[in-house]
Image: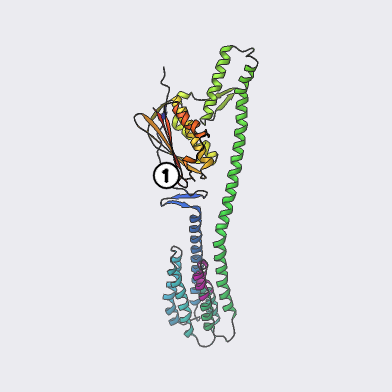
Amino acid sequence: MADPRVVLGERTVSASDTAPRLPGRPHFRSQYGTITSVELIAKERDRLLLRSARAIGLASTILAILCLAVPGVVTAMTLLSVLPLLAVLLFCLVRVGFSHSIVWVVLGMLAGLAILIVLQPSISGAATAGLRTALVPLAGGAIASFAIVLTSSAARFAMLLIGLVASTVLAEMVIGERQFITVEGASIALGWIVMAVFGYWLAASIPRAARRIYSIGRAHRAERQASETEAQRRQGARLLHDTVLATLTLLAHSGVGVAPSALQQQANDDARLLRQLRLGATPVPQSSGAYNLEPVEETALGTTLESVKQRFGRMGLEVSWHGTGQVLLPSDVLDAFLLALAECLENVRRHSGVTDAHVTITDDATTVRAMVTDAGVGFEIKDIDEARLGFKDSVVGRLQEVGGNARLFSSPGAGTTVVLEVPK
């Protein structure tokens, strides 16, 4: 006679199985641990702002250098004086694209304002047309590009206002015309305003777009789950119609036209099918009334555990399995063990208030244990009504029938742990 025992296949527990999760919030993995989507979006937003400031600032600085290098715009001595400051400005803009430090923003703005100060004594009277042209990309583009990263707090916004006023006033002093504001000065102020608005809009739009994308994804998942549930319902109705209901109809008519041995075999097949369904299997129809199922004695416990996990995953409870090894269980013990385990997970899904649970499988020379834990609301065990039969019958009673036992640990606010034990 074949040994009616089932093998628990090996399962390797990865770091993602044991890392903590934040309920109700999507998350991502990295080599540094668990990162929530909010943190990841904030990092990507800041990176985009810094790179935008760098790109605009570098392009504007290069344009300003080309304008200043045109013969006759400034004297050779003045050009040599501003070149080191321009180099500092370029270096700060490059560093801003890689670093979140405010130091490079402050140093870059100071270098830009210093260039405007150096340009003032180089002329007498009104500035040349070339110099006025160079001031716009310098003060309204290169220096103003730092405004993109200065809208996130009150202190940074104060720095933005100081830079706007200082660069506009210094540019007007270089131009040297006696009027409230020149066209170039207005262009510089407008450049600062445009950069600030762009930075604020970009910082506010990315999280909003991410929330909308997440809501669309959530709606898609809900629709897909509803479609899968409906498909499973139709499949279940067809399966019952092809098997159990057909057998019951024959019994109702006293098996007229069917041999007793054939009717007995059909009833045995139906009982076997229902047992597989309780364990979370998905029968594959071969023809009307015939479904492809592995014999119970040959079913791997690891595969069955995965089926239970997938079934509860479809219902919104994410189950993480832990433990390795090879475990042999008699088929009746396996049946009680898995059904009791499924009942514990159903209690987590319905009563814990969380969306994830952990199941740890261990064994020794005589016993196989499963520890089901959740970080839910918990409860006072002494307050449980003795008349409630769910845990008492579906878990404890079922395990005691095969020589096993169950223990329950819980307290309000500290989650719940259930330890299931069955003999090998």
Q: Position of residue 35 (x, y in %)?
A: 46, 52
* Amino acid tagged 1: Thr
Q: Residue 143: in sight, yes or no?
A: no
Q: Position of residue 389 (x, y in %)?
A: 52, 33
Range shown magenta: 140-162
Quarter placement of the N terminus: top left
Q: Is residue 147 magenta?
A: yes
Question: Mark 1 falls on what kind of element?
Answer: helix
Quarter placement of the C terminus: top left
Taking 76 as reference, is 410 above or below it?
A: above
Q: Is residue 362 magenta?
A: no
Q: Which residue is depicted at the point 56% across and 24% down?
A: 291
Q: Position of residue 351 (x, y in %)?
A: 53, 42
354 or 320: which is nearer to us? 354
**Which residue position is annotated with label 1?**
18
418 vs 291, left or right, is: left
Q: Position of residue 119 (x, y in %)?
A: 48, 81
Q: Label 1: few (<14), some or many (≥20) within 10 Å? A: few
419 or 15: which is nearer to us? 419
Q: Residue 176: in sight, yes or no?
A: yes
